[in-house]
Amino acid sequence: MTAPSQQKLKVQGAAVITANRLSDGAVVYRTAAGAWTTQLADAAVVTGTQAAKELLARAAADENIAVGAYVAPVDVGADRIEPGNLRERIRVAGPTFSLPACIAG
Amino acid sequence: MYIYDDFDLTLVAERVAEFRDQVARRLSGELNEEEFKPLRLMNGVYLQLHAYMLRVAIPYGTLSSKQLRALAHIGRRYDRNYGHFTTRQNIQFNWIKLSDLPDVMADLAEAGLHGMQTSGNCVRNVTTDQWAGVAPDEIEDPRVWAEILRQHSTLHPEFSYLPRKFKIALTAAATDRAAVRVHDIGLRLHKNGTGETGFEVMVGGGLGRTPFIGKTIKPFLPKRDFLSYIEAILRVYNQYGRRDNIYKARIKILVHELGAEKFAAEVEAEWRNIKDGALALDPAFVADIAARFRYPDYKALSDNPIELKRARAADPKFEGWFRNSVTPHRTPGYAIVTLSLKPEGAPPGDATSEQMDAIADLADRYSFGEIRVGHEQNLALPHVAQRNLPALWEALDAVGVATPNVNLVSDIIACPGLDYCSLANARAIPVAQELSRRFKSLDTQREIGRLHINISGCINACGHHHIGHIGILGVEKNGQEFYQITLGGRADENAELGALLGPAVPYAEVAEAIEDVVAAYVELRERPNELFVDTVKRVGIEPFKERVYATR
Ligand code: SF4
């Protein structure tokens, strides 16, 4: 139940910094250039607690663009980055069922 | 319907202007997130997994057709064409942009709607029986009292920063449809030995991490003392409630730690100081509020008209729906109709903008323009002439809200869970969808009989799993979704918390485990109409445990 942003930071493996865009709440990721992107593929990937902490500190200071920044696990494949857990998969892809508007047409 | 006066309309309009300014200042960076968050929460705006969520209050579950159309419009114009009715007589929009919110609130305000008292540590939207004012088993309309509380608590400076959120529910009927025993304060209107009407006052009920059934601290409170006594409870809570630990901050912990008797004594002491002051209720004031609830001009009709008899005899589908979804009304010739928002395989409590518009039109045509919202995440049309039931049924069926599964096993209550909620451990909606598919046969559902399944995606218990006949709670184990199952809970006048069945089961097995529980019940019950909860009470949970875990 503890939201990721409130958890003690211990990062094993690859991670990205994610947040919600202030103006519309959209899921965004921190890029290496210090900007935000809605594409996980363009996110800066870090490994280990120290690197994650540094990237998080810079991202969290940018809260007028994106709020609630936290470290999210990712799986890095040969040619793509995948969300590292179900919560993050849902944040990328939306709810795991069709929205009602689609059912009722 | 309750008719708002200029004071309310001005208050809501002022709040919109204030919020517009606050949003502009946040977007420009003048306010930081820490400053802004409490302001948005005071207006029902949360940040969830993918977007902002706006929660709109539906005071005592009563909506006009104009208001329902306003909600449909919000869904269509600013969201993804639907809304989600919650377990507390609210509606949530899940995909709202912060930059649109001032306009959303302005549009809502035009219909007298807002998000105040839907979040934050204040007295939340007061809830009551969704059949208030029309149920044959009630002694008077409890909404009058809910409205008095609403007026008193809205923006009440002393109660805007309570130790934690505060939920009050009221009932005036023999059957408790408002789950009053699991609220911070539960109020039951009843008559004492001399025939006077007053309130049984219960405190310290609640679900979440530490569930409790409320304790009665005042068996009979006269009406004149309604506000002063509740104020005394809130003052004692405000003074002694734990602000140092969010998990211990609700009034239920205080009542539990002090003991109900000591807590009641504290309330009495506080109450003595204020009971004869400004809060003593003048009957003329109560009468004035009551007069603002307008009841329809019912026609002189008789029960069981020929149109109804014919349709029931001619069409088994209509008959099935009638027996399931239509309930007696206090006025002869009328009926209360429940609209199921739980069609097979759909997320519980969701309605599209088209459905909301269609229901608003049908309310105008058949229910004097009025709609009700219940904590079971269904809607109701409260004033339908029985002779119109066949035509109404066809129209409801055409928009997908006539599934005759009310109170049956597929009428599942579920919170948004991990598909939306940032606090969730596990998904709730897909579990509900899977169960509703497995139990889709109406014959099977009818044979099983009344059975409430409640699902929460985390210990906060928004899906009220502790008081489901079968409760399902999502937990996380090593990054995987697991579900704890509880049996024997109930939300009515005999409220009880369910007992844990055994170890949590993984996502892939939860629907099957529930099927096992239901199959065991059907074998174990003494007679076809022995309720699931009664069977559990009689035989205990062991036989269910054996059935579920024998093969796992
Ligand atoms: S019970 Fe938990 S997961 Fe469900 S809506 Fe409440 S906080 Fe979210």
Image (cartoon, rainbow, N blue to C red):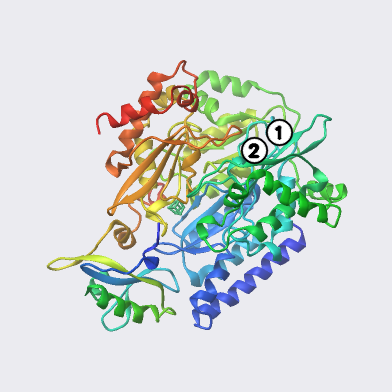
Q: Amino acid at mark 2?
A: Trp
Please identify the residue farthest to the left as the structure is shown.
A78
Crowd class of label 2 (few under 14; some 14 to 19; many from 20; radius 10 Å): many
Pick whichever, B393 or B409, lies toward us.
B409
Q: Chain of mark 2?
A: B
Location of mark 2 (residue): B131
Q: Can you see residue B363?
A: yes
Instruction: Report the side of B98 relative to B520 (left or right).
Output: right
Q: Quadrant of residue B182?
A: top right
Q: Residue B197 at x, y = what percent?
A: 79, 36
Residue under pointer 1: B138
Q: Chain of mark 1?
A: B
Q: Which is more toward the observer, B244 or A27?
A: B244
Q: Where residue B536 sits: x, y (%)?
A: 45, 26
Where residue B42 sits, quadrant-wise, is bottom right
Question: Comparing marks 1 and 2, which lies closer to the viewer?
Answer: 1
B209, B10: nearer the viewer: B209
Q: Secondary structure at mark 2?
A: loop
Residue B450, position as x, y percentages in the image: 49, 28
Judge left or right: residue B402 versus residue B187: left
Q: Position of residue B205 (x, y in %)?
A: 59, 45
Check whether the beta carbons of the residues at disc 1 and disc 2 lie within 8 A of each other: yes
